[in-house]
Image: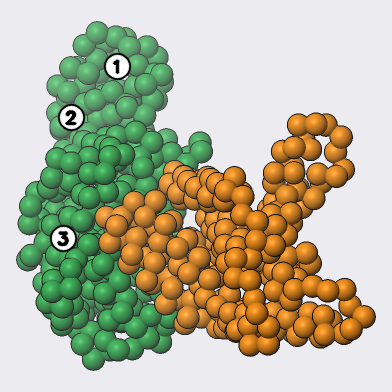
Chain colours: A green, B orange
Amino acid sequence: MIEAHDLTRKFGDFTAVAGVSFSLQEGEIVGILGPNGAGKTTTIRMLTGFLPPSSGRVTLGGRDLFSGTPDAVAVRRDLGYLPESVALYPEMRVEEYLSYRARLEGMDRTALRRRLGEALERCLLSDVRRQVIGTLSKGYRQRVGLAGAILHDPKVLVLDEPTVGLDPKQIVAIRELIRELGRKHTLLLSTHILPEVELLCGRVLILDRGRIVAEGSPDQLRERLQGQVAVAVEFESAGDGMAEALAQIDGVRGVRPDADRPDRPGRFVVEAAPGADPRAAIFRLAVERSWTLVELASARVSLEDVFVRLTTSDGRDAEQPDSEHELAGEAA
Amino acid sequence: MSGALAVFGRELRAYFFSPLAYVILTFFVLVQGWYFAMIVAFLADPRAAAGRPLELFFGQTIFTWLVLIFAGTFLTMRLISEELRSGTIETLLTSPISETQVVAGKYLASLTFYLFLWAPTLVYVAIVRWFTPVDWGPIAASYLGIGGIGALFLAVGVFASATSKNQMVAAVVTFFCLLVLFSCGLLENLVNGETAKKVLGQMNLWQHMDDFSKGIVDTRRLVYYASGVGFFLFLTSRALAAKKWR
């Protein structure tokens, strides 16, 4: 339905999103999960056609969102978007605002009349339809934004942090509504709250420092996390058969060159099976083959790292000193 | 097209719902009324040189210009910068509507409100007509000039509004651009170069308005305004597109 092809976005020297690719099938509810500053909003802004990527492409039903042709404008009709800021016009009335959004989408009067009532009802806004938006509570405004996003019955609905800043009661109501919407629309939502994706999404992309570090159903991800260990190994220089020899060691599940340090060909990331610690065996291997070992360290699996940051209240207070072994794990 | 109309409708309503518009409207009517009364009183004095009140009202004095420059600034400063500040630009630009449509809708709304501002001055025309026969040609030409120069000024303002999230910055930029646009023509008499003199002479808005008030319509001037409007609106839609790239 909607596809991101190798999206990269730079702001000056800072790379906010680096080579993100994924796609949503029709009817799927997918969550983008990541700590604050992981690049969620940047990714979403590119997906909705607001922010052009530095490189890469976004297609919706095969149509390019950044082709610069009139079709790139027209294709946005298939998209409903609730930005993180939920910016509305405070001086307008709810109904008035929604009619305006409908006209921007190019809906005619009859369609508007039909859809407006439905959107108001689904978002539980019927009792405030005549109210001025500026006087509404945050929870109501969030629902007005949602109503605006679903008004034209888009194929894909994109919600950026839809529950942020709401009180617990409102959060429950919005989640209920999102689940309801997921039955009719292909839905992508971003959040930094772990239980939220488990509750709502069939599939999760975990984003950290601008990369997708893991992808899968919430259950799969949980499984992958349990007791997983990775080891960073560096030999003075690259030699033949190093990766193969490492892979032979008991308890090793996978070996790959360290993608983050392409300047050091002798450097590998060794993934161990749950509970296994292959460090001693690696040392013995190095001695046996007379490979000069310059580094051997257990690296934190970045997924776990991300989860730790996600499961702590805000993600800010668990900021780690930047470990150089950031393992950008391949998707499961 | 329907998208541009939707933006136009919303902006026009926003004008009539905002206190700023009424403040502008009030001061506009007050200043113009006071100024018109002065002219009439002045011309009623037997010692005054003979003159036509409406000619004085539209041309030959600085008052028209103060009004034009302030109106151009205040009517446009909010237009786009407010959307940039509040973030509503995000839903607007992810709707199936092009930047050009957004700019066109907003600009036309400001132009409409601007023309609405001038509507009460028709009363002065009626008053003059009540007491004395009037020559309709110069009056029509004057309104044409007011419309044309106003359209140019508003386009400058809309562009400035797209360059900043801050309304005050937009207002200051507009104000200075309009001052430059207005006064560069006045430099005509301060340069010696043949070409410079000619170019600045063509851009002398003061002279333009003076001529309009006398009923002289030079189509080159209308082309100047129209191309200026086109140029600045094009820049605006580019600026809006460029906002996304940052």
Front residue (pair A221, B234): B234
User: Mark 3 belongs to which amino acid?
Assistant: Pro
Disc ID at residue A154: 3
- The crowd level at tag 3 (other Cα within 10 Å; few <14, some 14-19, many 20+) is some
- Residue A178 image position (x, y, % from top left): 17, 70
Looking at the image, which residue sits at the far right?
Answer: B47
Residue A193 appearing in the image: no
Disc ID at residue A286: 1
Ranked by sequence position, the earlier of labels 2 and 1 is 2
Q: Quadrant of residue A243?
A: top left
Badge 2 element: strand
Residue A287 appearing in the image: yes
**Marks 2, 1: nearer the viewer:** 2
User: Mark 2 belongs to which amino acid?
Assistant: Gly
Ranked by sequence position, the earlier of labels 1 and 3 is 3
User: Mark 1 belongs to which amino acid?
Assistant: Ala
Q: Are marks 1 and 3 on the same chain?
A: yes
Chain bearing mark 2: A
Q: Are marks 2 and 3 on the same chain?
A: yes
> Vertically, is A218 above or below A46?
below
Position of residue A34 in the picture relative to residue A62 (left or right): right
- Residue A40 image position (x, y, % from top left): 33, 52
